[in-house]
Image (cartoon, rainbow, N blue to C red):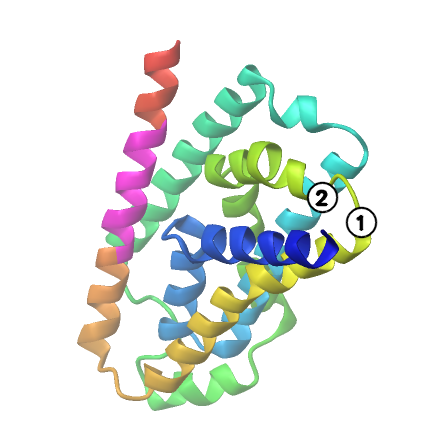
């Protein structure tokens, strides 16, 4: 049972993480446009969100995550936040330090403040992501009721692999991209974030 249970946690976690959504899209975009260090800071922000959700479950707060009003509020917040990100990306695409050789050199010594901004932005995306709330509150809960420590470790490994994969992929192909491609990456991400935002706000107002 333990082995099968751990395998089940891994499969569910991996599939949940690799499914396209705002979290992994933001990490991929950061890896492509800024670099591995900023992308890893964003990943840590996402992982901190997972820790908060799991902490809530551990403390017996699954009823809070499952509450319709809580989910609706976070759906609305998520819609507004993604709308803000979409606006920022579309208004000033590729405004990250990768477009000149001087900026690329500066990126090598990217400071803690910049990394922290990526961390906070990613944490906000994760905490306001209804997909994450549903994932932890309804799908993951039955898998971690027993052998909590082992299953949480397995879940974190499963969730982390797709994110580390997109960071590695983005870093590998980043040097082959031109400034024009960076602009289009931001435009595409802006449109996708905008689509997520419209959907979340639509769901909010339909329920109300």
Q: Main secondary structure of the magenta part?
A: helix
Considering every residue shown, the one lying at the far top of the view is 208
Q: Residue 168: x, y in percent?
A: 45, 79
Considering every residue shown, the one lying at the far front of the view is 1
Cβ–Cβ below 8 Å for labels 1 and 2? yes
Q: Residue 39: x, y in percent?
A: 50, 69
Question: Element at badge 2?
Answer: helix
Quadrant placement of the C terminus: top left
Q: Residue 137: x, y in percent?
A: 61, 33
Viewer can see residue 144: yes
Q: Mark 1: few, some, or many residues within 10 Å (few <14, many ≥20)?
A: few
Measure the C-alpha gap from mark 1 to mark 2.
7 Å
Residue 205 horizontal side relative to residue 168, left or right: left
Relative vertical location of residue 70 with respect to residue 9 in this rendering, above or below: above
Where is mark 2, residue-wise? Answer: 144
User: Which residue appears at 72% of the width and 51% of the height?
Assistant: 1
Residue 141 horizontal side relative to residue 164, left or right: right
Near-viewer residue (86 or 200) = 200
Relative vertical location of residue 76 with respect to residue 45 in this rendering, above or below: above
Question: Element at badge 1?
Answer: loop
Q: What stretch is highlighted in magenta?
A: 189-200
Q: Mark 2: few, some, or many residues within 10 Å (few <14, many ≥20)?
A: many
Was residue 11 drawn as part of the magenta stretch in this picture?
no
Give the numbered dot on residue 147.
1
Viewer can see residue 121: no
Was residue 199 drawn as part of the magenta stretch in this picture?
yes
Give the numbered dot on residue 122.
none
User: Which residue appears at 34% of the width and 50% of the height?
Assistant: 88
Near-viewer residue (172 or 183) = 172
Near-viewer residue (193 or 112) = 193
Relative vertical location of residue 117 with respect to residue 51 in this rendering, above or below: below
User: Which residue appears at 36% of the width and 79% of the height?
Assistant: 98
């Amino acid at each position: 049972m333990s082995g099968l249970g751990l395998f089940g946690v891994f499969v569910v976690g991996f599939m949940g993480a690799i499914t396209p959504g705002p979290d992994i899209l933001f990490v991929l975009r950061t890896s492509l446009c800024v670099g591995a260090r900023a992308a890893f800071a964003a990943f840590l922000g996402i992982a901190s969100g997972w820790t908060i959700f799991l902490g809530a479950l551990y403390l017996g707060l699954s009823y809070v995550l499952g509450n319709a009003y809580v989910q609706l509020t976070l759906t609305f917040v998520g819609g507004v936040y993604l709308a803000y990100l979409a606006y920022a990306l579309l208004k000033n695409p590729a405004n990250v330090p990768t477009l000149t050789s001087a900026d690329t050199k500066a990126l090598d010594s990217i400071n803690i403040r910049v990394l922290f901004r990526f961390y906070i932005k990613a944490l906000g995306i994760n905490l306001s992501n209804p997909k994450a709330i549903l994932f932890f509150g309804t799908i993951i809960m039955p898998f971690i009721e027993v052998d909590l420590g082992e299953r949480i470790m397995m879940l974190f490994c499963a969730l982390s692999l797709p994110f580390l994969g997109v960071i590695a992929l983005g870093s590998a192909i980043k040097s082959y991209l031109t400034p024009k491609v960076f602009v289009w990456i931001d435009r595409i991400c802006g449109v996708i974030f905008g689509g997520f935002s419209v959907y979340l706000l639509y769901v909010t107002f339909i329920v109300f």
